[in-house]
Image: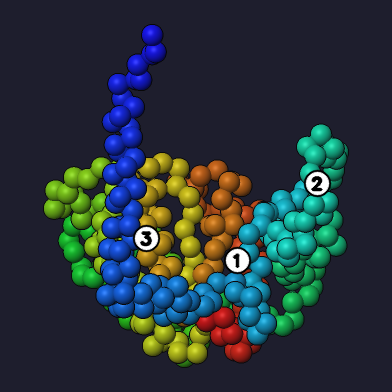
Amino acid sequence: MPSRPPPFRPLALLCAFCLLAALPLLYIQWSSLTTSLPPLASHLRLLTQPIQFSWHAYSSGGGGGREECPTDPFSLPGMLHWGSGPNQTRWVPFPISSEAYEPGAGPEKLDELDRSWPGLTEEEMDDLGAPEPLMRQLAEGGGQWAEGRSVLFVGDRYGLPDEEYTWHASSESPPKTPHRRISELFLPHMAADGLEGFTPDLLVVNSLYWDSDHLFDKYFQEFGIKRPKEEGLSFQEVRYHQQQSSALLRLLRALYPGARTMYRSRHLRASNDRGLMLRVAQLDQGWRAVCEMEGVRVFDWGGRLEGYTEFYDGKQHFAPGPVTWLFGDMMLFYLREAMDEERWWACL
C-alpha cells in the first residue's frame, strides 16, 4: 500500500505558489514607487556626499598634523620617565609614525623582553621627541633666554562666586568674588611690590577645587539640594561655572592684553564622596570647552601625573621633587613658546 504524503506538504506547496504569484506584483509596486519619488533618490545621493564640518579641523592642543603648527610634546600620548633623581624626570611621547607599529618594529614576544633593561637613555628620549630638560639646564647655569621673563599663576582661592554670598566660605574674609579680589587686593599688593604696570609673558589660570568643595558644597547645603554622588553637578551648574570661568579670562586679558594664556587642568581625587571626584572632572571638561572657544592652551600637568603619585586630597602642595621638577619643565617650555608670537598662535 503506497504511503500517504505528509499532511503539511499541500500547505507548503500552496504557500510557495502564493509567493511566486506575489513576486511580479511586488516588482511592479517597487518600480512604480522608485519612479514616482525622485526626491528620495536625490536625498539618498546627498547622504553619500562627504560631510562638511562647521568647526575647525585642528584643536588648540597639540599640532593636529599641520606643518606650520609646532608640536606640543606634553599634549602627546606618552609616559613619564621617573629616573633615579628628581632632575631626571621627563615626559616621553610614544612614537606617532605608522612605521613604528609595523610587524617587527617593536617587541612582540612577552617572554623575549629584556628583564634587566635599565630604561631609556637620554639619547633615546631625545629621539622620541621628549621635551628638553629645561629645569636641569637652568640649574646647571643655562637658560639665559628666560632672564627677565615672568609667568603669572592665578589660583582658585574662594572659587568663582558671582556675588558675596554670606553662606559661601563664611569663615573667610571678603572680598570673595574674582573681580573684587583682583581690584581690591591683587592689584594694590602688586603695586606695593613695585609691579604696577607689570605684564606677564605667560598667564596660567585655574579654578576647580574651591568651586567643587566649597562653593557648590555650600550651595547644596543652603538650598537643600540632595543628589546621588554618581550625578555630581548638573549640566546647568557646569554651564554656570563655564560662564564664570570665561568672565575671569576676559577680566585678566583686559588687565594683560599681551599675555599668552593657559588653563592648568585638574588632578585626580582620592575619593568620590559627595561626588567630589566627578565634580572636578566635570568642571575640568567645562574649562576645556571654554579654552577651545577662547584660544587658551591647556597646561595639563595633572593629566601627566595620573597614576604616578598618591591621590591628591590634602596632598596638592608638593614638596620639591620629581613632581615639581616636571612642573618646572612644563612652565619653562610654555614660557619659551609664549615668547614667539607666531609659534604660540599657530595652533589656535
Circle 3 or circle 1, nearest the eye = 1
Q: Looking at the image, which residue is at 31% across and 25% down?
A: 8
Q: Amino acid at mark 1?
A: Ser
The residue carrying pointer 1 sits among few (fewer than 14), some (14 to 19) or many (20 or more) residues within 10 Å by Cα, namely some
Q: Which mark is residue 107?
A: 2
- Residue occupying the far front of the picture: 1
Q: Amino acid at mark 3?
A: Leu
Q: Which mark is residue 283?
A: 3
Q: Looking at the image, which residue is at 53% across and 57% down?
A: 302
Tell me how far mark 2 sits from mark 3, CA to CA: 40 Å
State the SS at label 1: helix
For residue 57, above or below residue 307: below
Indicate left or right for 139 with 11 as reference: right
Tell me how far mark 3 sits from mark 1, CA to CA: 20 Å
Q: Position of residue 305 (x, y in %)?
A: 58, 53
Mark 3 in CB contact with mark 1 (< 8 angstroms)? no
Q: Position of residue 36 (x, y in %)?
A: 27, 75
Q: Which residue matches tag 1?
A: 75
For residue 183, above or below residue 302: below
Tell me how far mark 1 sits from mark 2, CA to CA: 25 Å
- Counting residues from the start of the chain, the first of labels 2 and 3 encountered is 2
Residue 130 position by quadrant = bottom right
